Each structure stands twice: as C-alpha cells, then as structure tokens.
Image (spheres, helix red, strand yellow):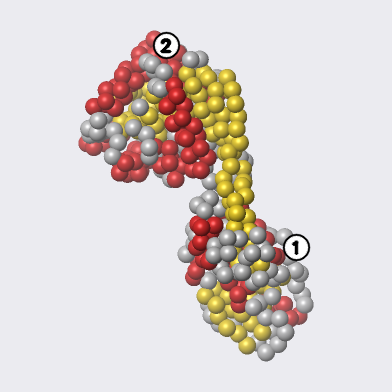
Amino acid sequence: MTKVAVTSEGPNMQDMVDPRFGRAGGFVVVDPETMEHEYVDNGQSQAMAHGAGIQAAQTIADSGAKVLLTGFVGPKAFEALKAVGIKVIQNLDNMSVEQAVQRYKSGDVQYAQQPNK
Amino acid sequence: MLISIASGKGGTGKTTVSASLTTVWDGPVTAVDLDVEEPNLHLFLNPWIASEDKVYLNVPEVDESLCTLCRECSSLCQFKAINVMGSAILTFPEMCHGCGGCMAICPEKAISWGRRELGTLSTGKSGFNDFLMGRLRVGEAMSPPLMRAVKERLVKNLDHRGGDAIIDAPPGVSCPAVCAVMDTDFILLVTEPTPFGLHDFKLALEAFVPFNKPVAAVINRSGLGDAGVERFCSEQGIPVLAHIPFDRDIAGAYSRGKVIAELSPELRSVFVQLARSIKEMGAGGRDA
C-alpha cells in the first residue's frame, strides 16, 4: 500500500502532528497497512532561510511517500508536491501522528486542491 | 561624488533631504531613487521621464531532454530555485537570485537562461538635473538586482555627463539599504531626536561604518523629543551637519509634494550649508 508521510514534532507515532509543513520538525513515514514506520528528520529545511517548503517536498518525494498528512502547506511547497504527484491532506493538526493516520485510513479526509497558507 | 541618503528607519525624512539637497546642489547632479520598493522622490522633483526600460533577471531554464537528474544544481542552490523532485526537475523563478551557479555546474549543459521581470528603470530630467528611478514589480521580493541595474545606469550617466549623484536609499539596514550605500562616497544618515530614532541610528551606524566611508548625520524634526541622538553623535564623533526644525509648515509642504528647501530663505540656507559641509567632508576624506 502507498506510504504516507506525516509532519511530526517527534519520531514516534504518539508525537503530535507538526502543523507546519516546510519547517516541520520531521516526518514519520508510515505504511498504513502494517503501521510500520520510520522517521525522517527535516533539519535540513529548518536551517534554510528560504525554500524550506520546497526542500521538504523534496525530502518527502525521496522518502517514497505518495500522500502527505499535515496542518498547513504554502503555495510553493504545494506546487512542488503537486509536480511529484504527492497528494496532500491538510488541517490535521492538534492530533497525534497515529490519530492522523487512523483518520486517513477511515477515509474521513479530503485531498487538498490548493494551499491553505 | 556619490552621496547616499540613508536612515535606520522609515519615515525619518530621507526623501525630504534628498529632494532639497538636489535642488540646492551647486553643480550638475543626478538624483537617484534607489528605494525601489516604494520610490517617492519623483513626487517632489516632478521629473520629466524620458524613458522607461524593463529590467530582467536571468533565471534558469532546463532542457529536460538533456537533464539526467544528477541533482548537482539542486544541491548547489541555496534558495531551492531549482530542484529535482522524484523524476522531475522543477524551477521556481521567483526564488532565483540569478547567480548562474546551476548553469555553471550542470555537467550536461542542460540549463540555459530564461528571464523574469524585476521592475522598471526610469530615466528623465528634473529641471537641469538628471533623474533616475527604479521601481520593483509588484510581488517581486528581490530588490538588489534591480538596484544594481539602476546603479549601472548611474555610472554610465556620470561617465557621460559628469557631476555628482544624490541617492535616496531605502530605509532600514538590511540588504537593500546596504546595497544602496556600499559603493557611495559619502553616507548621510537622516535621523530624528527620539529614542526610536536613536535606536535605529545606532543600528544604521553598526551596519554602515564597516564600509569605512565618511558618515554624517542630519537631525530632522529638531526640537521634538530629547537630546539623546545629539549626545550620541558627539560621543561617537559623528558630525551633525544640519537640523531641520519640527514645524507644521514643513509637514504641510511635504504633504503637498513641495521641496522644503524652497519654502523659505532660512530653510534654503540650511540645505545650502549642508551641501557645502558634505563637499568639504567628502573632499577631506575619511575623518568620520
């Protein structure tokens, strides 16, 4: 099944979803079927003055995830994610990574058509 | 001599001073508005604009048939203006600073120059003086490349016509302000005698003193506030070359787009004296 990347404030499933995309602490990349997961640090784009969202999109693309669960995505990052065919689900802040993935699995989500930041 | 009129903060009266100095300057002078994000010197000098040219910045264009997705360009670019995303190469022209690094490093020579519009460069005349102005395109974030284009035109103009230049610099102490003052011969800081004025004046000095050029101050709205700026200037050895009084008539004239040096003989002599002091200090070298 397609892997999903979740912006997170820490490396575990119980950590909170980071509402920011570009400057998220990191990404938990999850296989929703098995709930196996790995953590990808986003330090590289946190250190950038500009283009953090674009760098983060590149990191997600490299992780092999095809869906992104997050809080807010800016216009340039959105364009970059779209170009690589990564679907975006926004407004999933205020919950843990695990809850976000459960929400995604339940189907109670909408794919974003445009950036919300 | 190139004189930049700068300040640590906006609203101190750079444009007032620039316009008045230009008007009273003895000898040929080119007035330059380098506050390209919001130029307003023309509102006072009412120049006749002879030409308006678009200014472009070179940005990369990728020939995808040649690109092997090696990522050399994207790892070089500090602004993420060019990126490899999975099996696609993407450019973000509005992030590009136009350094050309991606083109130089590309092993496949897949990158060529496209361009994006930065803004316009206007040239004209105000009375007998030449006038130059840059205006950044709405939505464009990078002013220094446009400012460089204006400065190149200024250098050409001065080579051709001679004389001095009075440059209205952008407010603040970040890239645009530094870009405006860095290759001038004299920095005139306009400040106001308030704690805010003093705070930003200190920042401006910190930013501009390393260029090792003569620096002097003009106190605008003199009579308002306190003596902090004055005291600081005398401690630091920064000459205060002029005081412009805090005066309702000046504010009124400014709001109607009048050059305040033309308001009264007293004000005119303030600026004539200022122009003279600048010339003396400029000729005297780096005693600031």
The residue positioned 38% from the left and 16% from the top of the image is B27
**Based on the displayed image, in which of its 4 quarters is residue A16 positioned?**
bottom right
Q: Which residue is mark 1?
A: A113
Mark 2 residue type: Ser
Asked whether the residues under marks 1 and 2 belong to the same chain, the reply is no
Q: CA distance from mark 1 to mark 2?
A: 62 Å
At which x and y percent is residue A82? 70, 65
Q: Which residue is mark 2?
A: B264
Mark 1 residue type: Gln
Q: Residues within 10 Å of mark 2 (few under 14, many from 20)?
A: few
At which x and y percent is residue B272? 35, 16
Mark 2: which secondary structure?
Answer: loop
- Find residue B27 and name its label: none
Q: Quadrant of the C terminus of chain A?
A: bottom right
The residue positioned 44% from the left and 45% from the top of the image is B175
The residue positioned 37% from the left and 15% from the top of the image is B26
